Image (cartoon, rainbow, N blue to C red):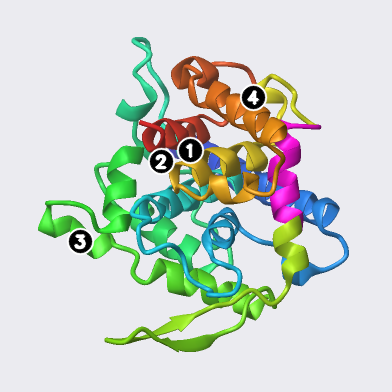
Amino acid sequence: MTSLTQRNVGLKQRKTASQGAEANDAQDNYDQREEMEDHDSKETRLTLMEEVLLLGLKDREGYTSFWNDCISSGLRGCILIELALRGRLELEKAGMRRRSLLNRKVICKSDTPTGDVLLDEALKHIKETQPAETVQSWIEYLSGETWNPLKLRYQLRNVRERLAKNLVEKGVCSTEKQNFLLFDMTTHPLTDSTVKQKLIKRVQDSVLSRWTNDAHRMDKRVLSLIYLAHASDVLENAFAPLSDDDYEVAMKRVRELIDLDFDAESMKEGTNELLWAVISAVSK
């Protein structure tokens, strides 16, 4: 009996170590990609949330459009994908009946802190919630857009302002106060246009000069950025400087991505199922 108990403990320890190693590998891959992508300055590494917000911020005014009611849920989708790409979250197994992406639950794969306050706050909520919830539910809970008063405690508050402050700390934006007749508002005008121009060019190139005609050959972060920027109604800002011909081609290819069968895409080899679940949820 003692020998059997020791073997069981050993198996559990190996399983825990294996999960931790997978999360560390995902984080290492993330760090390596960041180093390759922007080796000249650590301060300009941006998360998906910061990239989407940066695309939405008006350069001089320093705030997003007052009419944009999509960016809130889009930023929560960014948080889920960012955690998935860093090896912290995954989607539960599809099972024998191949449940659809939106019917499967989000599982905490590793609770190792990411070092990002927003990400770690969301990760803590997801880890502590039993039974597990779906991607759509988590986007609603984290946005505070739920009719269930018991779930309001999951709302991530002041997300846009907190992300804007991150951009200020990274030297991309500044902080100012503006008077709008009836109220004062903190704004974050752009100070480092190079960072935003690089971001815009990366988005443009992904659907023009570097178009692969295959979502699975695209960088996962760039692919996620396109979908989430579109869902947040800020992708247009990246395409605004294009010529009419390039704009038409770019939007045609974005439409091709949006028209994909996300459940079918998630079944292909080497995919991140949670990424496709979030894309499916925000693209409805």
Residue 253 spot, x, y in % from top left? 62, 25
The residue singled out by tag 1 in the image is 90
Of pointers 4 and 1, the one earlier in the residue sequence: 1
Query: Is mark 1 in CB contact (under 8 Å) with mark 2?
Result: yes
- Most common secondary structure along the magenta stretch: helix
Which is more toward the observer, 21 or 155?
155
Residue identifier under label 3:
152
Q: Earlier in the sequence, mark 1 or mark 3?
A: 1
Q: Amino acid at mark 1?
A: Glu
**Is residue 89 shown in magenta?**
no
229 shown above or below 125: above
Q: In the picture provided, is 107 more to the left or to the right than 115?
A: left
Between the residue at mark 4 and the residue at mark 1, the CA separation in whole angstroms equals: 20 Å
Q: Decide which of tag 2 and tag 4 comes sooner along the chain.
A: 2
Disc 4 to disc 1: CB gap under 8 Å: no
Region in magenta: 198-209
- Lower position in the chain sequence, tag 3 or tag 4: 3
Q: Which mark is residue 107?
A: 2
**Which residue is rendered at x = 38% and y = 39% of the image?**
106
Which of discs 4 and 1 lies nearer the camera? The answer is: 4
Looking at the picture, which amino acid does disc 3 mark? Leu
Give me the residue at 58% from left, 51% from top. Answer: 237
Q: Quadrant of the C terminus?
A: top left
Q: Which quarter of the image is occupied by the N terminus? A: top left
Rendered image: mark on residue 215: 4
Q: Give the spatial CA distance, label 2 vs label 4.
A: 25 Å
Crowding near pointer 3: few (<14 within 10 Å), some, many (20+)? some
The reply to whether callout 1 and callout 3 are in contact (CB within 8 Å) is no
Q: Position of residue 217 (x, y in %)?
A: 72, 25
Residue type indicated by callout 2: Ile
The 10 Å Cα crowd at callout 2, few under 14, some 14 to 19, many 20 or more, is many
Left or right: where does residue 35 sit relative to residue 90?
Answer: right
